[in-house]
Image: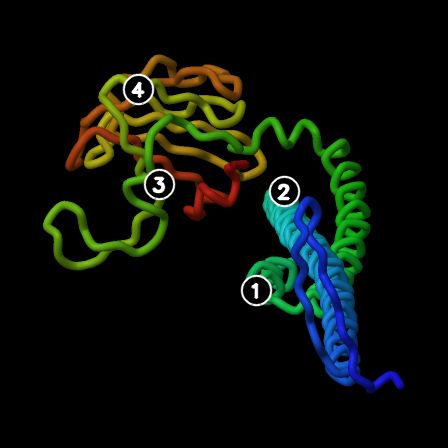
Amino acid sequence: MLLGKYHIVIFKEGSSGSRNLRMRGWFGFFVFILVATLVACNAWLLRVWFHAAILEENFANAERQLDEQRRGLINLAERLDAAGRDLQRVQSFDAKLRLMMNMEKDPADVGGDRLAAFSRSYLPLHRQELAVRKMQEYLARLSEAARLEEVRQQDLLRTLREKRDMLLSVPSIWPAAGFISSTFGRRISPINGSGTNFHKGLDISNRVGTPVVAPAEGTVTLTAPDGAYGNSVEINHGNGITTKFAHLQRWTVQSGQWVKRGEVIGHIGTSGRTTGPHLHYEVHLHGVPVNPMRYILE
């Protein structure tokens, strides 16, 4: 009966006419199935679209979280690297103080190159799990180095307190402002530009008249022209340490005078054998010239 013939009459309101439609039952059934299928497909597509939109939003949130974690890891790595550099700077300062005080360097040094290598070996890592593990290892090593450094600093502090008077006679500050034009050690002769000689001190270049100060307290033992050195001043700081200042424009102290650290003793000039205005600065330990940078606390 469902697949029989049907006669459909359509009347238009306000009109006496009508339209007749004749159709078989199977055609109506087919139209019904088609409409139901389209509705079901639209509902399925709508559900898939909604689920995809949720997944896309979750993926975007995950990407934002990953970016934040990446930025956090990079920031943490930079802070760790800065902490390592700070610790290295403290250790370098500690080593210089120990050298000045004739103390042996503690052999249990955990810092040094291994801490400095963090920026070269850890920062370029792109895999976050590996980066976190490396940072944890670095933090443990940094913490150990900091604890050892604290112990060394306490030991150094006790020694500094015991040798406070000796420290006043250590030439630990720059004798003049300027830039280093020649370092301690072997160099090419600046006079003739050929051959090498051993430079016994530092050359600090600046304008004529720049003040020269005593790097530590002591007794002035020389204020006179000294051959190729020109106008020179020498100071005996005790404990076998003496300093010499050459090529001065003039000196402002007298032989036998006691001077304090930072007191002006002369001015940069061009006296003696020189290629330009600068201070030639020497430090002698028991009569042997040593590198002045050994004592200068930068």
Within 10 Å of disc 1 (Cα), the crowding (few <14, some 14-19, many 20+) is few
- Which amino acid is tagged 1? Pro
For label 1, the residue is: 124
Residue 108 in view in this figure: no
Within 10 Å of disc 2 (Cα), the crowding (few <14, some 14-19, many 20+) is many
Query: Disc 2 versus disc 3: distance between alpha carbons?
Result: 20 Å
Depth order, front residue of 271/176 = 176
For label 4, the residue is: 210
Q: Image quarter for residue 142?
A: bottom right
Question: Considering only vertical position in the picture, is 277 above or below 201?
Answer: above
For label 2, the residue is: 97
Foreground tag (1 vs 2):
1
Q: Assign a secondary structure to mark 2.
A: helix
- Which amino acid is tagged 3? Leu
Within 10 Å of disc 4 (Cα), the crowding (few <14, some 14-19, many 20+) is many
**CB atoms at circles 3 and 4 under 8 Å apart?**
no
For label 3, the residue is: 202
Within 10 Å of disc 3 (Cα), the crowding (few <14, some 14-19, many 20+) is many
Query: Disc 3 versus disc 1: distance between alpha carbons?
Result: 40 Å
Depth order, front residue of 37/98 = 37
Question: Considering only vertical position in the picture, is 192 above or below 228?
Answer: below
Depth order, front residue of 43/28 = 28
- Which amino acid is tagged 4? Thr
Residue at 21%, 55% in the rendered image: 188
Residue at 58%, 59% in the rendered image: 119
Give percent across and percent down for residue 185.
Answer: 35, 53
